[in-house]
Amino acid sequence: MMMMMMEDRNTSDAARTPHYTTHATHATPQRYAAIELHTVSALSVEPDSNAHLQRSSRVQVWDLYTHQKVVSLPDEHSGDLSCMSFSSDSCMLLAVEKDTDHHRAIIFVSWSGFWVDAESLLILDNTKHKVLFATCVSRGVDASIPFVTGGEEHLSFWVLNGYNSICERSGTFEGDAMNYLKDRFKPSMQTPSLDSFIQQAQRVLCGTSFETHFVAGTAAGVLLIWDEFHCIDSLRAHKSSLSAMSASEHLLLTASVEGEIKLWLPGLVPLRELSIPDIVIQSSLCTAGAGPHKIVHAHIDPTHGTRALIATSLGEVYELSLWSSLATPLISGHTQPGRELWGLATHPLDPDTMVTAGEDGVLRRWSLSSNRALVCVKLGKGKAVHCVKYNFAGTRVALGCLDGTAMVVDALSLETVQDIEVQCESMLLRVTQLAFSKDDNWLVLANLNGTAACFRMQKAGAEGETDKYIQVGDVTLPTPSIRLDLSVDGQVFRSTGMSRKAAYYRTWGGKKDTAEGCSNARWSSMTLLDKADPNMAGLAPALPQGSSPHAMAVSPRGDLVAVGDSEGLVRILPYPCHVSAKDEAQPPPFVAFQAHPAHVTAVAWTADGTKLLTAGSPDLTVKQWAVKQGGAAGPGPAR
C-alpha cells in the first residue's frame, strides 16, 4: 500500500495537533494513477502483471507488485488515448488516440520485454475507421498477427512485416457468414430492418482469441468467427449488444450490455448462462433501483478458466466463480466520467456507517471498517445527486438533486420513502443544502438560485399511509446558500452564502430575522461560516489568498472544525476558532494536509469523532482520516 506524509502547517500547540491515517474508502479507476494524482483514461495489463497507464497524452509503465513507475514511453501523442493493448509476448503495445475519428495509432516496442528500452515502432496517422477496442492475438492464432482492432464496420488485423515493420490489414465481412445471418434475420425493436441488422452486425465492439480463431462480438449480439482475414462463420449469441469477451484455453465468456453472461465450450457449444442481477443478489452487495447492470469489461482467468473479473457500469467489480456462480465484490465506487461526487454523510449514531451519492445517480451505504458498500441503489433517470443528509435519528436520508427536486429514503434499505417536488419556479436549479430539525418535523432545502423551501412533517392519517413532508413556504435568500443550519425546534434557520454573511429566517411564513433575535436558538448543526461570528474569526487568516472553503464540519465533541478548500487541502482547527488576542491576522494553531488533487466537495466526522471523511472531485474518492488527539506534534503517516 502506498505511503505518504502530510504537512503540518503549524505545530506550536502540540496538544491540539491531531495525528492522521488515511486510505481510500472505495477504489476508483484512478487508484494506481493516484500516486501522481492524474486521471487514467486507458489501462492495459500484460501477462506478467506489469500495468501500463495512460494519462493525458503520455503513456507510463507501472509495476503492479511494487507500485513503481518503470518508464515513461516516448511522447508521440497529440491527445488522450481511447484504448491500448499488449501483444501476447508483452514486447509490443498498441495505443489508439482518442481524437474525433480515432484515426491515429502508435505502436511501441520493447526488444527486451522489460520496457526500460521502449521506443516507438510505428505511427499510423490514418486507420480509416473509428476504433472501439484493441486486443492481442494468442492461443493458436497466426503468430504474425500481434493485434486486432475493431469498430464501426471494420475489423483490422495488424500483421508483422519483417523484423521491425507492421502493417494494418482489413478483415472481409462478405461471404457465407453474412449470408447465413441474412437468411435467419427476424425483425426486432433494436434492428427493425435487415439493413439495420447487418449494420449492427458489422459494428464490432469486442473480441478475443479462442482455439485457433479470432471471435468478435458485435452490436447486434452476434459472434463473428474469423480465420485469418475472412469471416467464416457467425452465431447469434445474445439478444442485445455484446460489451465484453474473454477466453481461457478451453472456455469462452461473452457478456452483453444487459448483464447477461454466457459460457461457451470449444466449437462454440453453449455451456451455461448467468446474469449480473443474480450475481449481485448472491454477493454481499445488495443492489436495487432502476436500470440494468451493464457489463463494461470481463476478464477470465487464463490459466485455469474457473474465475472471472466482471466490471459493471455502476462502477462495481466482482470476482465471479464460473462454476458456483458465487461472486465477491472487490471494488465499488462512483466512477462515471465527467460527473462529480458531492454527497457524503456519516450516520449520526453508528460510527461505522456512511452514505455517498454522486452526480452519476447512484446511492450507496458503506461499512467503514470493511471499506465495502453494503447497499447500492441506482436512482431514477436524471436523478443526479448533489447533497445528502441524515436525520438525527439515523433512520432517513434526504437527497438534494441537480434538477431542483429532493428525495427522502430509508437509511437502511435506501428505498425511496418520498419524492419531493418544490413548489416554486426558482427551485429548478440544483439543491445545494439540506437540514433536518432534531425532531424530524422540519426539513429545509436551499438551491443554487438563492431560494430556500420549508417543509413540515404531516403525520399519516390512515392505515397504510406514511408520514410525508408538505411544503409550507419558501424564502428568497440574499445569495445562494453554501451553508444551512436549522434550529432544534425547527422554528428558525440560517443560511450563509459566498459573501460569508449569515441571513436568519423563520420557517413559518419565511419572515426575516436577525442574529440578535435568534441568539437563544439552539442549533441542530454548526456549519455557519459568517465572517462576523467570533467563533469562526480564525478561519480567514488560516486560508491563503484565493482559496475558498468548500466544505466544513464541526466534530461531535464540538472541539474541532474541519474545512476543505478549493485547492484540495483540508485544515483542522480548534473550535471555537478564535484569532490571536495580540494579532488578529494570526490564526490559531492548525494542521493542513493535501487530501485530494482538486477541490474538496464534502467533509464529515464519524459519530465517535475518531475519523474524518473527505470527498474529492474529480477523483471521485472518499478517504478516511484517523484522528488521534494528544499525540506528538508533527506530520503523521498515512496508509
Image (tube, rainbow, N blue to C red):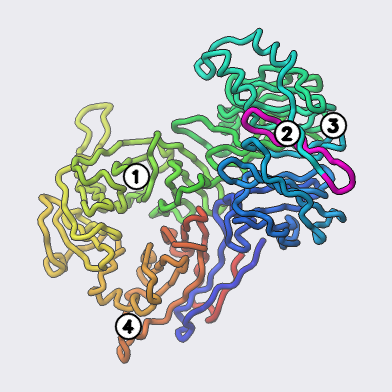
Real-space Cα separation, disc 2 to disc 4, in angstroms: 68 Å
Residue at 41% of width from left, 37% of height from top? Answer: 379
Residue pointed to by mark 4: 579
The circle drawn on residue 401 is: 1
The residue drawn where x is 23% and y is 57% is 486
Sequence-earlier tag: 3 or 4: 3
Q: Which residue has dot 2 on it?
A: 156
Q: Is residue 533 visible?
A: yes
Question: Can you see residue 323?
Answer: no
Magenta part of the chain: 148-165
Is 252 drawn above or below residue 596 in the view shown? above
Using the rendered view, name the quadrant where residue 575 is placed: bottom left
Q: Which residue is mark 3?
A: 141
Q: Amino acid at mark 4?
A: Val
Instruction: Tell me where residue 253 appears, x and y as whole percent.
Output: 71, 29
Q: Is residue 236 left or right of residue 459?
A: right
- Is 302 positioned to the left or the right of 573 in the image? right
Alpha carbons under labels 2 and 1: distance apart: 44 Å
